[in-house]
Image: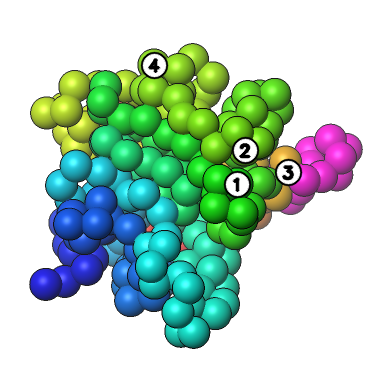
Amino acid sequence: MEKVIVEKKGGIIYVKINRPDVLNACDGDTYNAIADAWEELENDPNLRVGIVSGEGRAFCVGTDVKWVKSPEADGFVDRLYPRMLNLTKPVIAAVHGHCNGGGLEQALACDIRVSTEDAHFGSGEVRLGWIPGGYGTQRLPRVIPLGSALELLYTGGRVDAQEAYRIGLVNHVVQADKLMETCEKIAGEIIKSAPLAVQKMKAVVMQGLDMPLTQAVRLEKEYFDWLMRTEDSKEGALAFAEKRAPNWKAK
């Protein structure tokens, strides 16, 4: 059985973690397969957006605790999370059921998170004597209020979907049968936008978070000027004037 199912359709790469018997806990093969999929998203110009989900009753409960104690687990975080950190294209997390530990970190590494009403979220590493190793200590306080992040990190507790929505951890909470439909609708709207502009938008937002404002606005101006010289910028203006859909070339 494939531990990760990858499909491509209409500019979207679908990545489904497929270890339902262990609530999609990830071992080395699983992490590597997910990283391979994100490499494909990054390098294939026909792919514009990623959607990651989980099979069965969970999105992902994190790292397989039995596997992580094996010798082969040494350095297991060194590929997937750096790959997701450096992705220039958007990824949407379709979350249902359990989203804990490394599963939460994968969701945090996504740009947009959509959850079902039964989803719950937690960072339970502290209960195992660990801290998060997939950038959870850094991403979580950048997504939700600091106090809420610290409470989750210190206690290893969990929040349900409505609380996750209230604190800004997820963008939308939907019924289970609307989860993928909602993610695909968001992806479809992203695909309507100019691909280079989306990539530069992600870059300037993410890089700007770690810069003083004066430096961040200079970066914005640099990317703005660069995009204004692209073929897509001219095509976007022409298509608007002619009241038609633009033909993006990513040039």
Circle 1 sits on which residue? 126
Q: Is residue 240 above or below residue 12?
A: above
Label 3: how many residues lie within 10 Å, few (<14), some (14-19) or many (20+)?
Answer: some
For marks 1 and 3, give the CA distance.
30 Å
Instruction: Indicate whether 237 appears above or below 250.
Output: above
Q: Amino acid at mark 2?
A: Leu
Mark closer to the observer (1, 4) = 1
- Looking at numbered disc 4 in the image, what kind of residue is underneath it? Gln
> Residue placed at 62% from the left, 38% from the top?
153
Question: Percent position (x, y) of residue 100?
Answer: 42, 43
| Foreground label between 1 and 3 | 1
For the residue labelled by badge 3, is the local secondary structure a helix, a strand or a loop? helix
Q: Are marks 1 and 2 in contact (CB under 8 Å)?
A: yes
Q: Residue at x 41, y 49 (%)?
A: 103
> Is 176 left or right of 170, judged from the image as shown?
left
- Structural crowding at the residue carrying mark 1, measured as other residues with C-alpha within 10 Å and reported as few (<14), some (14–19) or many (≥20): some
Q: Residue furthest bottom?
A: 71
Which of pointers 1 and 3 lies earlier in the amino acid sequence?
Answer: 1
User: Label 3 sits on what residue type?
Assistant: Gly
Q: Which residue is mark 3?
A: 208
Residue topped by disc 4: 162
